[in-house]
Image (cartoon, grey):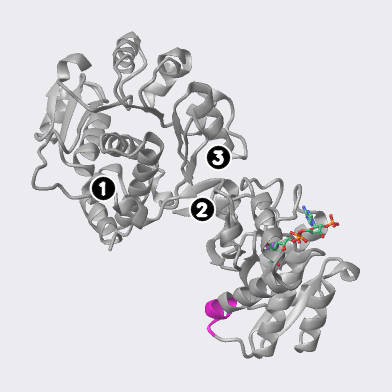
Amino acid sequence: MTGLFTAAQVRGAERAAMAGLRPGVLMQRAATGLAAVCLGLLGRAHGVRVVLLVGSGDNGGDALFAGAVLAVRGAQVTAVLLAPDRAHADGLAALLRAGGRTGGAESLARADLVLDGIVGIGGTGGLRDDAVALVHAAVAGPGLLVAVDVPSGVSADTGEVAGEAFPAQHTVTFGAVKTGLVVGAGRGAAGTVHLVDIGLGPHLPAPDAEQLTDADVAVHLDPPGAGDDKYSRGVVGVIAGSATYPGAGVLCTGAALRARPGLVRYAGTAAEGVKAAWPEALVTSGRPGAAGRVQAWVVGPGMGTDEAARSVLAEVLATDLPVVVDADALTLVAAQPGLVGDRTAPTVLTPHDREFARLFGEVGGDRVAAARRGAAALGCTVLLKGDATVVADRDGAAFVNATGTSWLATAGTGDVLAGVLGAFLTGGPAAAEAAAVAAHVHGRAGQLAAEQGPLIAGDLVRVLPRTLARLRGADG
Ligand SMILES: NC(=O)C1=CN([C@@H]2O[C@H](COP(=O)(O)OP(=O)(O)OC[C@H]3O[C@@H](n4cnc5c(N)ncnc54)[C@H](OP(=O)(O)O)[C@@H]3O)[C@@H](O)[C@H]2O)[C@@H](O)CC1
Ligand SMILES: [K+]
């Protein structure tokens, strides 16, 4: 599990850590780690042209000290100071002693690497005009773009970008991963995130949110034991698709079957199509109650929003079983929130942004807060789909997904996620964790399928067994 932290949490840990250390020690650790990552990215230092963008805070100080390390190793380091009279004095002195120099924005046109030390966790509001001009010049130049701690312009807490941000290819962050580096616009601006340990660990509080790793997910992928049968492996009920458009039913049922082979029961008007595609599923064209015993329901993809669909949804939500509410079912819940709000059994809503807006109002720039707001409003779990899918529970626990690919933005992939989630909801973990596991698996399946080129949703179902096998391997 990777903990995600706010700027205030990191500052608190920094204060506590500093109490037992000489002044400047944490900055030295940060700068040394930063320089090491840069060396790794460049492959060498000698003769390499490095440009530092230096604001007036400690973020600029980190860049200057790292620049000094690189200069000692033979790099040609130029510091562009946004506020020359307020640049970190010791950092600037160290850089000059090491053979670095100060210069103007024109140096960016010949840079091999640009270090963005304009502003870190002390930033507020959008980037100022002088900083924006420098960022544009850096982007126009040939240098590799590396952000110090946080890409300037990104809110470390939320990932919001008010205006413009430094579009980093790599971000070297200190002490703890900030939530804003992995979610929303910040995720796009941060590129690959490298965490440098500066010794804050023992002083960090419980994280603001969490990110599952492959190893965290692997523990939920236990193979069947000798005593297992189809019932003990979990029975998922699927209500999706229609007689005219059976596709959603086929994808959702297939995903549930492939995610955790036990038993999948299908109920709905796409029964014929589902049976043809998945003879392993037990199908009925009748009501949910006619499907037989299930341990969790998935309801909604392609089921329509007419009165028949509404009454089926109401029947499922009236049970005391866990339910995944997706797609058309979300539209129905938006019109009648009491269907979910009155439940006591786990309910996972899986909206994309437009569906979320219909349920809870606009998502806005703070996606974790939005998911928490939705979960609290209906007393459920919300899985807010996106470039980084966010899961929040009614008690405020939150996960940000770490896997996926933009190739997943294609029809039917949501139906697959719903099926996978239904399967994991039968498996033991609490609803929010099950949703986070499903999002992680779905993202990894997308990455695997995308290795063969553009993917279609059916590819996700096909690669699920291989995805799960690979993830299981991460356990050891
Ligand atoms: N915490 C830790 O454990 C450690 C932290 N460390 C490092 O310290 C960093 C935090 O340093 P910090 O507190 O000095 O703030 P920082 O991010 O440099 O920003 C303040 C400056 O930015 C400016 N500014 C503000 N908004 C702006 C905007 N929108 N657009 C443009 N400029 C803007 C603001 O200007 P002012 O308002 O004063 O004119 C002020 O000068 C942290 O990110 C990490 O790198 C490590 O060294 C070691 C361990
Ligand atoms: K920065």
Among numbered discs 2 and 1, the one appearing first in the sequence: 2
Among numbered discs 2 and 3, the one appearing first in the sequence: 2
Residue underneath mark 1: 459
| Bounds of the magenta segment | 38-43
Crowding near the residue tagged with mark 2, few <14, some 14–19, many ≥20 C-alpha atoms within 10 Å: some
Q: Nearer the viewer, mark 2 or mark 1?
A: 2
For badge 2, the amino acid type reads Gly
Q: Position of residue 8 (x, y in %)?
A: 68, 50
Which residue is pictured at 68% across the width and 59% down the height? 16
Asked if the magenta segment contains residue 268, the reply would be: no
Q: Is residue 277 above or below residue 85?
A: above
Which image quadrant: the C terminus?
A: bottom left
Residue underneath mark 3: 368
Quarter where residue 75 is shown: bottom right
Measured Cα–Cα span from mark 3 to mark 1: 29 Å
Quarter where residue 27 is shown: bottom right
